[in-house]
Amino acid sequence: MIQSLPTTPPFDSSKLSSRGSPNSPFANYTDSQTPTALTESEEFSAQSFSGSTSELSLDYNRGSSNHTQKMEHVLWQLESDLMAPEETPVSLAPPPPVNDIKWLLIACARALDENKLLDFDRLVEHACGVVSISGDPIQRLGTYMVEGLVARKEASGSNIYRALRCHEPAGKDLMSYMHILYEICPYLKFGYMAANGAIAGACRSDDHIHIIDFQIAQGTQWMTLLQALAARPGGPPHVRITGIDDPVSRHARGDGLAAVGKRLAAVSERFGVPVEFHAVPVFATLITRDMLDVRPGESLAVNFPLQLHHTPDESVDVSNPRDGLLRMVKSMSPKVVTLVEQESNTNTAPFFPRFKEALDYYSAMFESLDVTLARDKKERINVEQHCLARDLVNIIACEGKERVERHEMLGKWKSRFTMAGFQQFPLSSYVNSVIKGLLGTYSEHYTLVEEDGAMLLGWKDRNLISASAWH
């Protein structure tokens, strides 16, 4: 739990644009003095690459001239040194690089990490003058990272994160934002495609297939797989899908798991594939084998799509639910298990290195969005606001069990699966080649790397999504 820190900065609060400001992305969602009351289940709910904030009206002013920025920095540093105790040596720190927002964000995080609150407040004031939701990628990302830093300083990050959950936009709106992200961000689409290819390959000759999806969301992943199974020589198999999802996600999904069932039924009728859907509205950490209705004679496929990092590990809970879930899945003898995860290290890292990792990861993510949607386009603002900002706040401002965005790198996932008794199931080289060709239609900067049977999707020199399969 973050200890309470002073909340009044030595400057006009309107410049800070913290959560209480009407210009803040999180305005009206929470007051650090009046925590939002939620059910216990909501405290642990999370959906990767999804979330919401209030309707943005933030438009940070750009900074003044380069000379003025340097002069202001020297003046406030001099003021700090003159006000320090006599025994404190006086030294002027070099001014920040002009308009280097990444440097400025790191300086803010370092000051907060070292509990230099006066420096932090002044650096944040400077940052608020150069970030913008309609600027270049680092300016847009900086808007949300500054909000997360301020929330951490005020020990109110958890309140913001919970409030974002309670103030999700209408279900149809959020579904639209998520669909836009899915269409413009090929990491998600092609990560799912790689997983589907592994399932289709493992079960190519089976007449009865049972897919257990640990975060079925809108069921989008299975539409293309069912269509492919319909064209299988000899006729399609009977497919049973068990969809697990957040029990309080009705608004986030449009109508919850019932809507997913209707969508799958429509696909079943359209393509002539017999589909049976079983909804399990339970958090993954509470799932037992009995809930999954595993039947003899069915080929079992288990899917973890951007979900497993939400399950706590030994650093949060001594019972280690993350590894326990993998052992439970292994006990069901699945034919294949597919994993799609963010390629980032935010699980056990302390605050400052975790902040820098998030900055590096989301810088690449926001930059990649820049090539598909114009900076001033409202759809892009909504996607970043409703599908990415919430995760950032959680990574930066929350700790302990309240920090649910706990990503791990592919190497760590390999260790966990191996310790649970799994062996790697190589992804289809044919599917990977198709994905690589399709990536080029988005941008030449998207990358695909095949690594020991797994696949890494990225932007330039940063891997963003990993896909792997196990048995």
Image: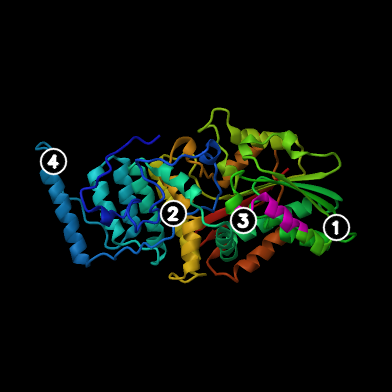
The residues bearing labels 1 and 2 have C-alpha atoms spaced at a distance of 44 Å
Residue placed under numbered mark 3 in the picture = 254
Q: Earlier in the sequence, mark 2 or mark 4?
A: 4
**Gap in angstroms between the C-alphas marked 4 and 1:** 77 Å
Say whether residue 354 is visible: no
Callout 1 secondary element = loop
Residue under label 1: 236
Q: Nearer the viewer, mark 3 or mark 1?
A: 3
- Name the element at disc 3: loop
Q: Earlier in the sequence, mark 3 or mark 1?
A: 1
Indicate the quadrant where residue 438 lies.
bottom right
On the image, the x and y values in percent for residue 50 come to: 54, 53
Is residue 73 toward the left or the right of residue 406 in the image? left
Count of residue discs: 4
Compute the Cα span from label 4 to label 3.
56 Å
Question: What amino acid type is highlighted by mark number 1?
Answer: Pro
Q: Is residue 43 left or right of residue 306?
A: left
Instruction: Work out whether 122 lies above or below 272.
Output: above
Above or below — where is 222 with respect to 348? below
Q: Secondary structure at mark 4?
A: loop
Q: Is residue 317 left or right of residue 267?
A: left
Marks 2 and 4 sit apart, C-alpha to C-alpha, by: 35 Å
Disc 2 marks which residue? 360
Q: Residue 284 appears at what percent x and percent y? A: 63, 40
Bounds of the magenta segment:
253-265
Q: Residue at x 78, y 54 (%)?
A: 201
Tell me if 336 is positioned left or right of 75 in this view: right
Q: Residue at x 44, y 60 (%)?
A: 55
Q: Which residue is mark 4?
A: 84
Nearer the observer, 455 or 208: 208
Choose the circle earlier in sequence order: 1 or 2.
Answer: 1
* Circle nearer the viewer, 2 or 3: 3
